[in-house]
Amino acid sequence: MKNIGLVGMGLIGKTHLEAYHSIPTAKVTAICSRKEWKNELAPFFDGSFVTQYEALLSRDDIDIVDICVPTFLHEEYITKAAKAGKHIICEKPLTLTEEAAERIIHVTEECGVRLFVAHVLRFWPEYQTIKAYSEIDKLSNMETVHIGRLGQLPAWSEWFQHPEKSGGALFDLHIHDIDFVYYLLGEVERVYAVGHQNQYGAWDHILTTLTFKDGAKAFVEGSQRMPNGYPFTMSLRAQTSKNALDFQLKAGENIEHIDGSQMIFYESGQEPEIVDVEQADAFQNELAYFVDCIENDRENAIIPLDDVLYIIKLLQSIEKSLETGREVQVM
């Protein structure tokens, strides 16, 4: 059993809290938040609240700090947790620059603590199914992938609108699908992106073309610019020379109200097949895996830190393409 200190009670912090409630090897012992949420969190939490981060870090009964604060605070919070000897789970994105990511990884290694970054699509049942199909004849040798997520600007906090705090939709939303196509197709040779910026300069709608080193292409769309009432939508279509897999999911304003998903596999000469996906909670999958890696000293084979660093480099290449209007070689 590992004791968790959960930091931040925005949407993702509450989502992590609910997930831990169903993980028998983990217990949220303390929450660090400016507000006490006793009534709202009663079904999932019977620990203590602290308002000062340092008070959480000073506790000997905390094994893991789960950081769900705004992106621009990640480096500071991770550094303090590492120096306090705590293992760390951090919500994506880890940070907004390659240099900051390298500093973060260095300090965790220097302090001898484990760092896990929550790229949740790698644990999402539908995306796990797509990954499994890519490793067998059904979808091996993919030629093209169309993937995206469309939603409204998060309404629960204003910091998302500012590029220096969130990285805009590029780092906050587009990252999910950029990470997943890399997980599917490997290293990228070049990128070209176009998009729209909000009044603060944050990219809030992006369309990216990625050309992979094996010749495959991915066309990725991400938006936090959809009008009120437009359902949060996740989609992926993967094609080989003979087969295709089509996935669609629609929710409410955000992922907390999923109406259901559908995945259909198309094979030349066969009737379309509805793919039966085993239902599971992606956040439970993710956090249970991280806790297991710590508890049993296992390698993090699903989201190694090298992948996390590569995705930040890739997002910076996409950002450069957005700013220059040119195709960018990925180094």
Image: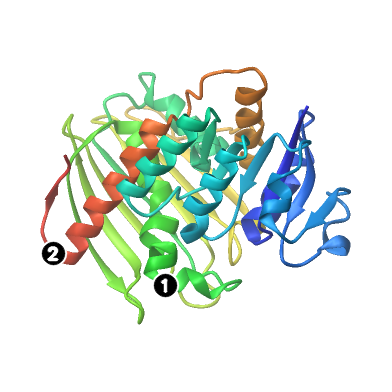
| Residue corresponding to mark 2 | 324
Q: From the viewer's perspective, is 331 left or right of 118? A: left
Could you tell me which residue is drawn at 85 percent across and 52 percent down? 48
Instruction: Check disc 1: other Cα within 10 Å, few if <14, some if 14-19, many if 20+.
Output: some
Q: Is residue 169 visible?
A: yes
Instruction: Work out whether residue 46 or residue 204 is closer to the camera in this orientation and state it.
Output: 46
Secondary structure at numbered mark 1: loop
Compared to residue 82, the image places residue 14 above or below, namely below
Q: Earlier in the sequence, mark 2 or mark 1?
A: 1
Residue 162: mark: 1
Compared to residue 141, the image places residue 60 above or below, namely below
Q: Is residue 303 visible?
A: no
Instruction: Work out whether residue 124 or residue 171 is closer to the camera in this orientation and state it.
Output: 171
Give the mark toward the camera: 2 or 1. Answer: 1
Residue 25: x %, y % from top left? 76, 28
Compared to residue 247, the image places residue 61 above or below, namely above
Q: From the viewer's perspective, is 132 left or right of 38? A: left
